[in-house]
Amino acid sequence: MQTKLVIFDRDGTINQDRDDYVKSADEWIPMPGVLDAIARLNHAGWHVVVATNQSGLGRGLYDMAALNAMHAKMHKLLAAAGGRIDAVFYCPHSPDDHCNCRKPAPGLFEQIAERYGMELTRVPCVGDTLRDLQAGAAVGCTPHLVLTGKGEKLRGKPLPQDYPAGTLVHNDVSAFADWLLQQPEPASKTVGKAASKSGSRA
């Protein structure tokens, strides 16, 4: 069975980021065009999952109820646009916890690979920061930088050398979707288990 999978970062990529963290559903505001872009990917057969650092949990800035409310809003707005995110994989730890799931560590991507029963080689991973792409590249994902959120500062500048080799740059998620939908179909991959509703979902 063929699975077409895309892995997105959340803050700064799908929704607006904040210097003081996105702490509530009211503060979760989608980027312009992102809901329609994800819906277009879905309609073309792409499964979308999210891999996100949520150290605000570990720092005590918000609780699980607040995170669940953010993602309930995200799913509701996406549904209204005709799209969906299959699952959200998140790291709840602070940097002091030295975990393996906080990006740039690859733990979240390893969880996704396990849930979907597939290797992530050449699976697109999309984010607005270096650590998003480093985490994906560590498991073989193809890195895509969007110039939104923290990526905005690189607009009009050459990509720094510390970015993974082969990183592709897009103005935003909508531009990434335009690019992906023009590409040839990915090679068939065997899926060991269904995961459309699995994962560390919040």
Image: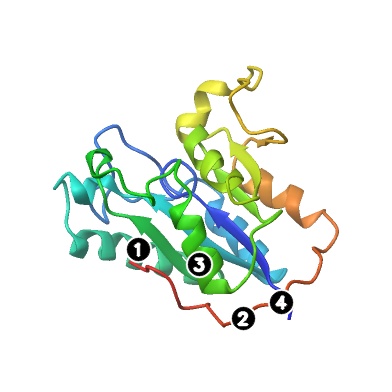
Is the C-beta separation of discs 4 and 2 under 8 Å? Answer: yes
The residue sitting at 71% across, 53% down in the picture is 122
> Which residue in the structure is indicated by mark 3?
85
Q: Give the answer, above or below, for where 8 lies relative to 150.
A: below
Q: Rounded to the nearest whole Å, what is the CA distance between mark 3 and mark 1?
A: 10 Å
Given the image, on which type of amino acid does mark 4 rest?
Thr
The disc, 3 or 1, on the residue closer to the chain's N-terminal end is 1
The residue positioned farthest toward the left in the image shown? 60
Q: Secondary structure at mark 2?
A: loop
Q: Earlier in the sequence, mark 1 or mark 4?
A: 1
- Judged from this view, the residue extending furthest toward the top is 157
Instruction: Specify few, some or many for label 2: CA neighbours under 10 Å numbering under 14, 14-19, or 20 or more.
Output: few
Can you give x and y, in whole percent of width and height, for residue 144 in the image?
A: 64, 41
Picture quarter with the N terminus: bottom right
Front residue of this view, candidates 7 and 83: 7
Tag nearer the camera, 1 or 4: 4
Residue wearing tag 4: 190
- Is mark 3 in CB contact (under 8 Å) with mark 4? no
Residue type marked 1: His
